[in-house]
């Protein structure tokens, strides 16, 4: 296993981001650390995290539960202030600023008083762009993700998986270029999840956006991403970055290739190691 780390696609050091054609990256996270204090006890959650999403790149984060992945998204989205570090988008410092990203939170927070269609249109509405065209696009996509006929329904009338699909569409249709997706498919059954992955892959390849994607599913990360950051257990820091070598357009069949299986094995091993470290021994 160890020699697999010698693989040309796997780097154990995180390299300094390169700039594509001198265009600054869509997102640069530099030296972010964060601790929360609760009842006078301080818990360090993120430790010196730096990562880059180049323009129109699909980047995933995997790491043990509780290692600070969602907290990092809250920091990028300006909802939580980092103790140290800087967030840049398109070369501009935006640390602590809201409204710059399209974001799907881990718990799909649909507004209960808005219909599904109006929830999906929220991003456009906040940007003052909820016109007939946006409404038409929303209907088209609702149909595509199997929510046709539910445009006028309210969130409580939908299953968990259906709510997740609506929340995903809301992020997709928001006008901001950089999309942060926090485990967008975790509430879906295996078949729907696989369908949504294929659909997202095709959609992203046809119409590239800059995406930062959190998942616990290693195959999902390998299928969709250009690169993957592996986080340590809490406090989360970056242990490895791998470049995913499969050419695009990709299809699900790559999951059967020896190269895919090798990367999957390596990532699973890293995850197992981290999970084992973060487990406290029984007294
Ligand atoms: N607002 C907060 N106040 C205090 N502690 C917090 C706050 N937000 C997160 N935490 C703590 O930070 C740690 C990391 O939480 P976070 O939700 O970022 O983990 P995660 O990597 O997304 O986990 P999971 O994979 O389970 O979603 C946890 O111990 C959590 O209790
Ligand atoms: Mg989380």
Image: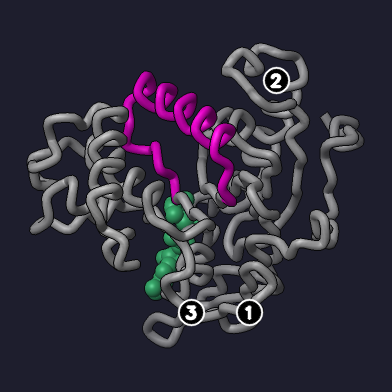
Q: How crowded is mark 2: few (under 14 residues within 10 Å), some or many (20 or more)?
A: some
Q: Position of residue 42 (x, y in %)?
A: 50, 81
Q: Is 129 on the left or on the right of 270, as rendered? A: left
Give how far apart the Cα atoms at labels 3 and 1 are.
9 Å
Give the quarter of the image for residue 255. top right
Is 181 displayed left or right of 57 in the figure? left
- Quarter of the rendering containing residue 224: top right
Q: Quadrant of residue 130?
A: bottom left
State the extent of the magenta-drawn residues as a range.
182-210
- Which residue: 68% across, 35% down? 267
Residue 144 lies, in percent from the top left, at 31, 28
According to the image, label 1 marks what residue? 93
Horizontal side, residue 205 vs residue 49: left or right: left
Residue behind mark 3: 97
Q: For ligand 2, give the image quadrant.
A: bottom left
Measured as percent of width and height from the top left, residue 78 is found at: 47, 75
Between the residue at mark 3 and the residue at mark 2, the CA separation in whole angstroms equals 40 Å
Q: What element carries label 2?
A: helix
Query: If you read the primary sequence from the N terminus, does the residue marked by circle 3 or circle 2 appear first?
Result: 3
The structure residue drawn at horizontal position 82% and vertical position 62%, both measured from the top left corner, is 22
In the displayed structure, 152 sits above or below 239; it is above
Q: Does the magenta stretch include residue 165?
A: no
Q: Is residue 41 above or below residue 184?
A: below
Q: Is the residue 198 above or below the residue 181 in the image?
A: above
Q: Mark 2 or mark 1: which is in front?
A: 1
Tell me the element at label 3: loop
Q: Name the residue under label 2.
A: 261
């Amino acid at each position: 296993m160890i020699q697999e780390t010698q693989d040309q696609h796997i780097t154990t050091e995180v390299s300094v981001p390169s700039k594509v054609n001198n265009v600054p990256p869509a997102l640069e996270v530099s030296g972010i650390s964060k601790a929360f204090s609760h009842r006078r006890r301080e818990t360090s959650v993120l430790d010196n995290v730096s990562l880059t999403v180049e323009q129109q790149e699909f980047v995933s984060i995997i790491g043990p539960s509780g290692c600070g992945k969602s907290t990092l998204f809250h920091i990028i989205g300006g909802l939580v202030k980092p103790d140290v570090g800087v967030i840049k988008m398109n070369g501009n410092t935006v640390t602590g600023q809201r409204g710059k990203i399209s974001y799907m939170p881990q718990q799909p927070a649909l507004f209960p008083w808005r219909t599904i269609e109006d929830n999906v249109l929220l991003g456009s509405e906040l940007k003052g762009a909820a016109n007939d065209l946006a409404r038409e696009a929303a209907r088209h996509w609702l149909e595509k993700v199997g929510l046709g006929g539910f445009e006028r329904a309210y969130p409580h009338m939908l299953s968990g998986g259906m709510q997740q699909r609506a929340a995903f569409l809301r992020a997709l249709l928001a006008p901001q270029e950089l999309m942060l997706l926090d485990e967008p498919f975790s509430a879906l059954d295996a078949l729907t999840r696989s369908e949504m992955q294929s659909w997202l892959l095709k959609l992203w390849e046809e119409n590239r956006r800059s995406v930062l994607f959190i998942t616990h599913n290693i195959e999902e990360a390998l299928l969709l991403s250009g690169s993957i950051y592996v986080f340590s257990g809490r406090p989360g820091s970056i242990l490895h970055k791998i470049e995913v070598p499969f050419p695009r357009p990709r299809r699900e069949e790559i999951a059967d290739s020896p190269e895919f299986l090798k990367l999957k094995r390596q990532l699973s091993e890293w995850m197992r190691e981290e999970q084992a470290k973060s487990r406290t021994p029984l007294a």
